[in-house]
Amino acid sequence: MTLVSLKAAVGFVGVSCCFGHVGTVGPNCELERKRAVLASLHTVLNTFLSHWICRLNSGVYCKTGRDGRPYAEGRPYFAGSDGEWAVSGHSGESLEQTNFLFEVSISISPRQICEVGFNAGHSALTLLVGAGSNSSYLGFDWSILNPGLNEELFRMIRDWLPSNNMTIVWGDADPSIRAFLLQGGGGICELIVFDGPHDVLQVLKFMPLLRVMAKRSRPFLFLDDVGCVAAMCHHSTLAWRFLVWLGMVSPISCRVAVGHAAGEMGACLGRFQWGQVVRCHTFDARCVARTLGMVEPLQREHWTRCCLEPSAQVNPDAYLVHIQI
């Protein structure tokens, strides 16, 4: 698609919509226009990506981890944590996943979107089109899996949406977010999307940091790869269940997309919580990881032993996560 035809698709989609009595576009027409714009931009993005190795609709994820080893279902419960492996997928492969993100963005209308895991940019594009031109985007991503490609995709989307303020910090997201918070960047995010490393230790490590970044009046969290049966979903699903049990997250809704090339995809929307509803403020994430594969009642029984008092004797193998009250 040429730049001229792209501008035509974006600028004039929805002209045939019905108009209100005073000549203004009605809300249904605006929603229809946004959906059409999003579909056009996804088509351009997917066409660009089709020339790269990690093709959409191929049924194959880019599965090379940071250590050069492939992700495998048989690896132990926390093997590959601390950044040894990561899975780079594309939200745009699933229409249901895209619709869920779009509906969340439309309903919340966040002024500030924060995301860990820009990847190919489908989710960022979907969220910004849904939220409208007044929304801003702050992303954190490590482009080591697709060096050069991620940066090019970000520049493309930023050029397509000049009304939205888009910023991204490249590199390891954990130290990047910590540095951002030290500079006073907390309490700004109205919708946080986590599509970063999917192993349970990484998810649990990131959540307290993202909670500090959340705006307390609108602390929405969207966690990807939850509730589905694919191997890559097991860790995120365990982390989500624990966060809900812990009281750190209040669930709102979840959705599983079955028509996906690589199998099921799932995601959940919730809100961060503070105060007495949180069961404990220090826990051992490896203790939580060891419950992978257990039935839920046994998991919950085991999780009570994962909470630690500040004065507790800690196993040297522990992976401690601290939560601000």
Image (tube, rainbow, N blue to C red):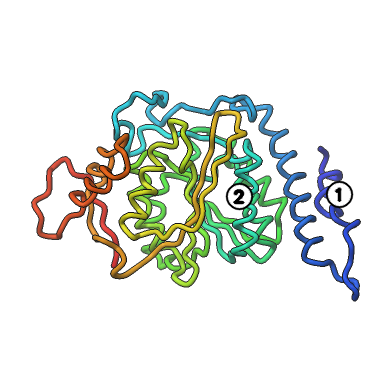
Q: Nearer the viewer, residue 89 or 150?
A: 89
Q: Residue at x 74, y 45 (%)?
A: 39
Placement of the N terminus among the 4 image quadrants: top right
Q: Amino acid at mark 2?
A: Phe
Q: Which residue does the numbered mark 2 point to in the structure image?
A: 100
In the picture, measured across the screen, residue 188 lies left or right of residue 101, that is left
What percent of the width, then of the height, locates residue 42? 71, 42
Q: Residue at x 39, y 32 (%)?
A: 85
In the picture, measured across the screen, residue 17 lies left or right of residue 142, that is right
In the picture, measured across the screen, residue 242 lies left or right of residue 158, that is left
Q: Quadrant of residue 271?
A: bottom left
Going from the N terminus, do you reach mark 2 or mark 1 first? 1
Q: Nearer the viewer, residue 309 or 188?
A: 309
Vertical placement of 250 versus 121: above or below?
A: below
Q: Residue at x 83, y 48 (%)?
A: 9
What percent of the width, then of the height, locates residue 200? 35, 41
Q: Disc number at residue 8? A: 1
- Dot 1: few (<14), some (14–19), or many (≥20) neighbours within 10 Å? few
Vertical placement of 218 versus 67: above or below?
A: below
What percent of the width, then of the height, locates residue 28? 78, 62
Q: Amino acid at mark 1?
A: Ala
